[in-house]
């Protein structure tokens, strides 16, 4: 037995002699944890703490977003309602100024309405009419055609384009838009018969035919 015990002790000493550095790193000279082990344990502990803090922050922020969402939705709805109310106000005031001939004020208000509601076809149409009155035919055409693109069944911009092209002397385009307007609303025939803006078309067989004078 003593022989076996001595052999085991000898083997252990040889093993310790092979890895003295690693032993000192992991364990101190007295068998206590070494510097490397202590630092490793400290770093792992810090990593676990940081990970836990990160996860807590993420879940906390997620909960806050979920709670605040309904408030944001209400704010959006409130903003939209206020914006549409302002559009209606700008539109009515602009129409008033347009009727009394104060075109600059009307134009300014229509543009303010468009800033809040860029797809408002009534505003685009009326703004186009003002541009016609100012002989700004390029802007008038752009505004009226924008209204048509947004609402192809809207009769007014077709009729106003007919007037615009009549002013410009483009009879074919004027008649084309007038026909389209009449196809959408038969009352347009009466407008055309009385409208001095279409006087350049009067006497033309095509005009007489589509307005029902024949």
Image: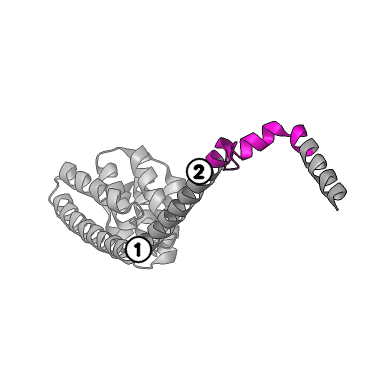
In this rendering, the answer to whether 24 lies above or below 123 is above
Residue at point 77%, 38% (across, down): 13
Viewed as shown, does residue 79 lie left or right of 149? Answer: left
Q: Nearer the viewer, residue 164 or 72?
A: 72
Q: Quadrant location of the C terminus?
A: bottom left
Disc assigned to residue 1: none
Q: Is residue 36 magenta?
A: yes
Q: Which residues are magenta?
A: 15-39
Residue 168 lies in quadrant: top left
Q: Is residue 33 magenta?
A: yes
> Disc 1 designates what residue?
69
Viewed as shown, does residue 72 lie left or right of 148? Answer: left
Residue 171 lies in quadrant: top left
Way the structure is coloured? one colour
Q: Earlier in the sequence, mark 2 or mark 1?
A: 2
Residue at point 62%, 39% (across, down): 26
Q: Residues within 10 Å of mark 1 (few under 14, many from 20)?
A: few
Label 2 sits on a secondary structure element that is helix
Viewed as shown, does residue 41 lie left or right of 167? Answer: right
Q: Nearer the viewer, residue 56 or 47?
A: 47
> Disc 2 designates what residue?
42
Viewed as shown, does residue 70 lie left or right of 101? Answer: right
Residue 38 in percent (x, y) is at: 53, 41
Give the Cα distance between marks 2 and 1. Answer: 41 Å
Label 1 sits on a secondary structure element that is helix
């Amino acid at each position: 037995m003593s022989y076996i015990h001595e052999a085991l002790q000898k083997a252990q000493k040889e093993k310790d002699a092979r890895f003295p550095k690693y032993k000192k790193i992991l364990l101190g000279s007295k068998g206590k944890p070494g510097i490397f082990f202590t630092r490793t344990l400290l770093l792992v502990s810090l990593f676990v703490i940081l990970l836990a803090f990160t996860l807590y922050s993420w879940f906390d922020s997620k909960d806050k977003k979920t709670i605040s969402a309904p408030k944001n939705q209400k704010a959006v709805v409130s903003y939209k309602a206020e914006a549409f109310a302002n559009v209606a106000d700008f539109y009515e005031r602009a129409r008033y100024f347009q009727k009394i001939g104060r075109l600059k004020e009307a134009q300014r208000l229509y543009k303010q309405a468009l800033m809040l509601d860029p797809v408002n076809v009534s505003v685009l149409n009326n703004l186009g009419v003002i541009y016609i009155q100012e002989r700004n035919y390029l802007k008038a055409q752009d505004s009226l055609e924008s209204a048509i693109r947004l609402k192809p069944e809207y009769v007014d911009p077709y009729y106003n384009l007919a007037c615009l092209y009549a002013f410009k002397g483009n009879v074919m385009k004027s008649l084309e838009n007038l026909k389209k307007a009449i196809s959408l609303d038969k009352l347009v025939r009466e407008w055309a018969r009385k409208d001095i803006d279409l006087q350049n078309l009067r006497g033309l067989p095509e005009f007489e035919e589509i307005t029902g004078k024949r």
